[in-house]
Amino acid sequence: MVTRLLDWIKTHKLSTVLLLFVAYFLVRYFLGVTIMPMQSATLNRQVSPSMTVESMPYGTTDMDMKASAVGSIGFPAPDSYAPTPQITDRLVIQNSYLSLLVENVVETRKKVIDHAVANGGYMVNAETNNPQDAPTGTITIRIPSDKLESTLDTLRGWSIKVVSENLVGTDVTDQYVDVEARIETLEKTKAAMEDILSQATVISDLTNITRELISIQSQIDALKGRQQSLEENAKLAKITIYLSTDEIALPYAPSETFRPQVIFKLAIRSLITHLRALGSMGIWFAVYAVVWVPVLLILYLLNKRFQKRG
C-alpha cells in the first residue's frame, strides 16, 4: 500500500502539491475554529471578579480594581497619597461582584434593573448571551452606598446558588484631601494674580497675567471635576452581577475539583464544537470546489496525456 502511494505521488506531483495545499488551509481553519472557543471558555471561567470594569464585555477582563475605581477618573493609586488618620468620615468607593446561578437569566436581569431604579440607582450596562441554549448574562448597576448591603441580600435571595462573591473597597479620602489642598493653593495664587492684574499698566504684563489666570482657572476646574467624580463614585456603589442557568458557564470555576456531571457537560460541549467545526470545514471545502475541482481535472487530463505520449 505504501509503495503504491509513493508511486502515485511520483507520477502525480502537481496533484500531490495541490492536495497538500488544500489540506494545509483546511487544518489551519479547523484548528482556529476549535482551539479559540475552548481557550475563550477557559479564560471566562478563570477570570477574577476583581478584574472587571463597567465597559468590559462579559467574561473578559484585564484591569485591577484599584485602577478601575480610581485610575479611571484620572487619579494615581491610593498608596501614592499620605494617609490622613485624623479624618473619621472616610470616602470609600465600593465595588461588588456576584456570580449567581439562577433559574431564568432574562427574568432575573429585569428584576435587578427594576430593583436598582426603585432604590435610587440605575443600570450601567446589561448583556445576555446564548439565550437559546444555556443563557448567560452580565449586569452592572449603580446603587446608593447605604443600600448596598440590602441590595446584595436581595440578589442572593433571587439565586439558586451564589457561586462567587467579592466586595472591593477603595479608600479615596487621602486623594480627596490632596485635591482640596491643591484647589485652595491655586485659588490663593489666582487671587494674588488678580491683585497684580489690577495694578498692571503695561499691555504685555496684562496679556501675560491674563494668560496665567486662564491657566490657573482651568486647573481649578479640572480638580473640582475630580473631586466631584470621587464624591459621586463614593455615593453610588457599583455592583456587577454575572448570571447563568449553568454553573460552569459563569466566570468562576466551581469549588469542587472533580465533578463528573460538570466533566460530562464539558465533554458534550467539546463534541458539539468539533462537530460544528467539521460541518464548517465541509462547507468551506464544498464552496472552494469551484477552484480545486477544475484544477484537479486539468491536472488529471494533463497527466493522462503525458502518459499516452510516454
Image (tube, rainbow, N blue to C red):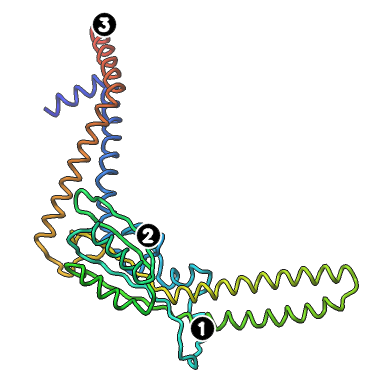
- Which residue occupies the foreground of this view, 171 or 46? 171
Could you tell me which secondary element the residue under label 2 belongs to?
strand
Q: Is residue 42 above or below residue 304?
A: below
Q: Which residue is mark 3?
A: 309
Q: Report x, y in % for residue 198.
A: 84, 77
Residue 217, picture quadrant: bottom right
Measured in 3D between alpha carbons, the distance from the residue under mark 2 to the one under mark 1, in whole angstroms, is 30 Å
Residue 132 shown left or right of residue 53 in the figure: left
Q: Which residue is mark 1?
A: 174
Give coordinates of residue 136: x percent, y percent: 25, 56
Q: Is residue 257 left or right of residue 199?
A: left
Relative to residue 136, is residue 28 depicted above or below? above
SS under mark 1: helix
Looking at the picture, how far across and down is residue 34, in whole percent?
Answer: 24, 45
Q: Residue at x 27, y 54 (%)?
A: 39
Residue with the most extreme bottom position: 86
- Residue 250 seen in the current view: no
Question: Dot 3: within a 10 Å radius of its alpha carbon, few (fewer than 14), some, or many (20 or more) residues?
Answer: few
Label 1 vs label 3, nearer the camera: 1
State the separation of the CA atoms marked 2 and 3. 73 Å
The C terminus - image quarter: top left
Tell me the kind of residue under disc 2.
Answer: Asn
Q: Position of residue 7 (x, y in %)?
A: 19, 22
Whether residue 136 is visible: yes
Label 1 or label 3, whichever comes before in sequence order: 1
Can you tell which mark lies on residue 55? Answer: none
Q: Amino acid at mark 3?
A: Arg
- Can you say whether 115 is above or below 278 in the image? below
Residue type marked 1: Asp
Image point (40%, 69%), residue name: 64
